[in-house]
C-alpha cells in the first residue's frame, strides 16, 4: 500500500504564461485540422464532380443543381491574364497566411484554417486540371465548390468575430 507521503506529487504549473501557451497550441491544432479538412474535402468533392456530373442533377428543382463547370478564372469566374492571375492568387494566399500566423483567437484561427484550406484545395485542383472545378449551382448565384464554401464560411466567421469584438461581447486576445 502507498501512503500519501510515499506518493510522488505532480504539480501542474498553470499560471497565465502556461495558460496562454496551452491556448496557443490548441488554436494551432484547430488551425491545422480545419486547414487539412477543408483541403481534403475540396479535393475529394472536385474529383467526384468530374466523375459523376456529366449531366446536371436537380437537388431542389431549378433552385439547387449539381452541375460540373470548369472555371479558368478566380472568384465568380473573373479571368485575369496570365501570369497576373497566378501572381494575384499566390500573393493573396501569402498575405492571408501571414495574417493567420499572427491571429490570436480560436475563432479567427478556425476561420483562417478554413480560408487557407479552401484556397489550397482550389490551387491544387487548378495545377492538376488547369482550371477550377465548380459544381454547386444555387439560383442565379455563380456555380461554386466545397473549397469556395470553406473560404466563404471562414470570411463570415472573421466578420462575426469582428462584430463581437466591436460590440464588446468578445475580448481580443
Image (cartoon, helix red, strand yellow):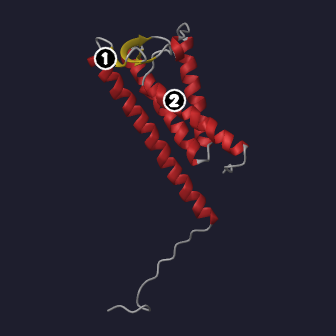
Question: As drawn, which residue projects farthest toward the top?
Answer: 81
Q: Secondary structure at mark 1?
A: helix
Q: Is residue 62 above or below residue 107?
A: above
| Nearer to us in this view, 150 or 91 | 150
Residue that badge 1 annotates? 50
Task: Looking at this view, name the residue that lies furthest to the front.
Answer: 61
Examine the rendering and report whether any part of residue 63 can be seen: yes
**What residue is shown with label 2?**
151
Q: Residue at x 46, y 37 (%)?
A: 35
Q: Residues within 10 Å of mark 1 (few under 14, many from 20)?
A: some
Residue depicted at x 58% and y 38%:
100
In what element is the residue under mark 2? helix
Residue at 52% x, 42% y: name it. Answer: 110
* Residue 142 image point, x, y percent: 49, 14
The image shows a total of numbered marks equal to 2
Quarter of image, res 13:
bottom right
C-beta proximity under 8 Å, tags 1 and 2: no
Q: Nearer the viewer, residue 95 or 45?
A: 45
Residue 97 shows in the view:
no
| Residue at image location 40% in from the left, 14% down from the top | 62
Residue 4 position in % (x across, y down) = 43, 90
Reply above or below: 87 against 112: above
The residues tagged by marks 1 and 2 sit, at their Cα atoms, a distance apart of: 21 Å
71 relative to 124, above or below: above
* Residue 89 - label: none
Q: Nearer the viewer, residue 20 or 55?
A: 55
The image shows residue 173 at horizontal and vertical percentages of 66, 51
Density class for disc 2 (Cα within 10 Å; few <14, some 14-19, many ≥20) is many
Which badge, 1 or 2, is on the more N-terminal residue?
1
Task: Classify the position of the N terminus by image quarter.
Answer: bottom left
Left or right of 136? Residue 47 is left
Residue 165: give x, y in percent of width and height: 69, 45
Amino acid at each position: 500500500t502507498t501512503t500519501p507521503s510515499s506518493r510522488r506529487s505532480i504539480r501542474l504549473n498553470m499560471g497565465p504564461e502556461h495558460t496562454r501557451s496551452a491556448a496557443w497550441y490548441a488554436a494551432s491544432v484547430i488551425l491545422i485540422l480545419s486547414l487539412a479538412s477543408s483541403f481534403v474535402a475540396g479535393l475529394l468533392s472536385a474529383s467526384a464532380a468530374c466523375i459523376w456530373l456529366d449531366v446536371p442533377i436537380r437537388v431542389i428543382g431549378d433552385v439547387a443543381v449539381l452541375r460540373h463547370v470548369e472555371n479558368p478564372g478566380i472568384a465568380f469566374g473573373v479571368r485575369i491574364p496570365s501570369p497576373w492571375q497566378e501572381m494575384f492568387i499566390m500573393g493573396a494566399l501569402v498575405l492571408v497566411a501571414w495574417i493567420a500566423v499572427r491571429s490570436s483567437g480560436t475563432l479567427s484561427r478556425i476561420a483562417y484554417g478554413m480560408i487557407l484550406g479552401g484556397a489550397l484545395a482550389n490551387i491544387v485542383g487548378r495545377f492538376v486540371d488547369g482550371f477550377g472545378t465548380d459544381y454547386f449551382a444555387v439560383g442565379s448565384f455563380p456555380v461554386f465548390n466545397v473549397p469556395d464554401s470553406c473560404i466563404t464560411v471562414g470570411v463570415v466567421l472573421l466578420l462575426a468575430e469582428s462584430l463581437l469584438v466591436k460590440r464588446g461581447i468578445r475580448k481580443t486576445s
